[in-house]
């Protein structure tokens, strides 16, 4: 995730002590930043701090790229600090957090279509980027994976994620917007302006609610990803689904700083949402988990052969029949624990 203020200060102070202005200017130029234009004056410490700030505030943040290239540049005196700051909470074979296959202690297997969808979802290079991600699929299919993935990815991209669970809540459409406001940290003044409406307004009359929410969010500094979950659950009423869809549609049309993900939405998509990003949820099979294990162990002191990776994956799947919701949760934990061990070069002992 982006460097904190204290981490940025530490790196700037180390650059100030161990490097020189000419070297930093040339290094910044390689990264496409004209430091003489961006920070034409001030002390070397101040100019180094400005350079780090630019990289940190890029959309998406380029702090990990900065640290990696500083380490490769081999500037004496920087290696220890940069190595320390590089201890990121994820492992990605491509160094891109979108492609991370391990976040902290949670493994994330395959779902390449989802990863590609999220690449589009997080691309802010164009103001026309879709603000809506729709994840369809019947349960159990790994839709919870999507929330975990977005939640861990969001801060790495300089954004904030919020999760609204609808299952067994009985929310009215108005309550859905109120709950989202609570998750976003709206103050009492904001809630005082929440439109008073009938308990279950239809899609055509949710305009005041969507306008209220987007109007408030647009005044906030951060970009927010609101993930609305359980839309395919039997306890979620059509009115609740309509309210969630109305928010997504409004976010897509207005394109402010609000992105919306609808998890388990299997309904009809309006023409105005034709350009939104879609994903079909699905739990990985043993062959995909085997490939994941092989990748996890590749850079360790004890890499896996394809055959051994398949044996391990098949063994884990055999422990959890059937693969229902509870089984998926248990299997995901086993895959995560095994992934961490393989990354450290520790292979499980499996009796034939």
Image: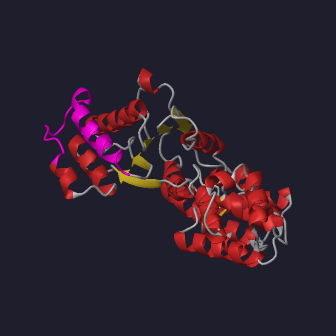
Q: Residue at x 24, y 41 (%)?
A: 173
Please state if 282 lies on the left or on the right of 309 as rendered. left
Q: Nearer the viewer, residue 304 or 219?
A: 219
Instruction: Let me know if residue 103 appears in the view.
Output: no
Q: Verify whether residue 336 appears in magenta.
A: no
Q: Residue at x 81, y 71 (%)?
A: 75
Residue 110: tell me if it is visible: yes
x%, y% of residue 275?
51, 27
Q: Most extreme residue toward the front, as rendered?
A: 41
In front here: 221 or 286? Answer: 221
Q: Find residue 186 and report its image quarter.
A: bottom left
How has the structure been colored for display?
secondary structure
Q: Magenta segment range? A: 193-220
In the rendered structure, the answer to whether residue 345 lies left or right of residue 198 reads right
From the top left corner, tell me how far across and down residue 51 is, in percent. 64, 60
Residue 175's x, y, as percent?
22, 47
Please tell me whether residue 200 belongs to the stretch shown in magenta.
yes
Q: Quadrant of residue 62?
A: bottom right
The spot of residue 305 in percent (x, y) is: 86, 60
Instruction: Kindly identify the residue that appears in the image at 79 percent across and 73 percent down.
Output: 345
Nearest to the observer: residue 26 or residue 41: 41
Farthest residue to the top: give it. 271
């Amino acid at each position: 995730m982006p460097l904190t203020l204290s981490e940025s200060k530490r790196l700037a102070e180390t650059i100030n002590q161990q490097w020189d202005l000419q070297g930093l200017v040339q290094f910044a130029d390689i990264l496409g930043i004209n430091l003489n234009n961006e920070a034409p004056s001030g002390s070397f410490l101040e100019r180094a701090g400005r350079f780090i700030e630019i990289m940190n505030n890029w959309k998406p943040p380029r702090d990990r790229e900065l640290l990696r290239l500083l380490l490769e540049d081999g500037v004496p005196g920087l290696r220890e600090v940069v190595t320390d700051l590089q201890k990121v909470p994820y492992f990605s074979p491509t160094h891109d957090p979108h492609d991370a296959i391990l976040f902290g202690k949670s493994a994330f297997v395959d779902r390449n279509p989802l990863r590609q969808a999220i690449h589009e979802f997080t691309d802010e290079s164009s103001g026309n980027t879709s603000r809506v991600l729709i994840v369809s699929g019947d349960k159990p299919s790994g839709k919870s994976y999507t929330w975990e993935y977005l939640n861990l990815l969001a801060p790495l991209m300089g954004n904030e994620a919020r999760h609204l669970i609808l299952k067994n809540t009985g929310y009215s459409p108005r309550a859905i917007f109120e709950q989202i406001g609570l998750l976003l940290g709206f103050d009492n003044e904001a809630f005082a302006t929440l439109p008073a409406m009938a308990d279950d307004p239809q899609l055509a009359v949710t305009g005041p609610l969507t306008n209220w929410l987007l109007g408030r969010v647009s005044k906030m500094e951060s970009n927010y990803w609101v993930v609305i979950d359980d839309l395919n659950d039997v306890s979620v009423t059509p009115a609740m689904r309509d309210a969630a869809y109305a928010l997504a549609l409004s976010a897509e049309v207005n394109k402010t700083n609000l992105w919306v993900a609808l998890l388990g939405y299997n309904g009809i998509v309006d023409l105005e949402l034709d350009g939104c990003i879609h994903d079909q949820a699905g739990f990985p099979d043993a062959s995909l988990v085997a490939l994941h294990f092989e990748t996890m162990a590749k850079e360790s002191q004890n890499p896996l052969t394809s055959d051994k990776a398949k044996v391990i994956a098949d063994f884990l799947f055999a422990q959890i029949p059937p693969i229902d919701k509870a089984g998926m949760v248990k299997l995901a934990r086993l895959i995560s624990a095994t992934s961490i061990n393989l990354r450290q070069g520790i292979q499980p002992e499996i009796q034939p």
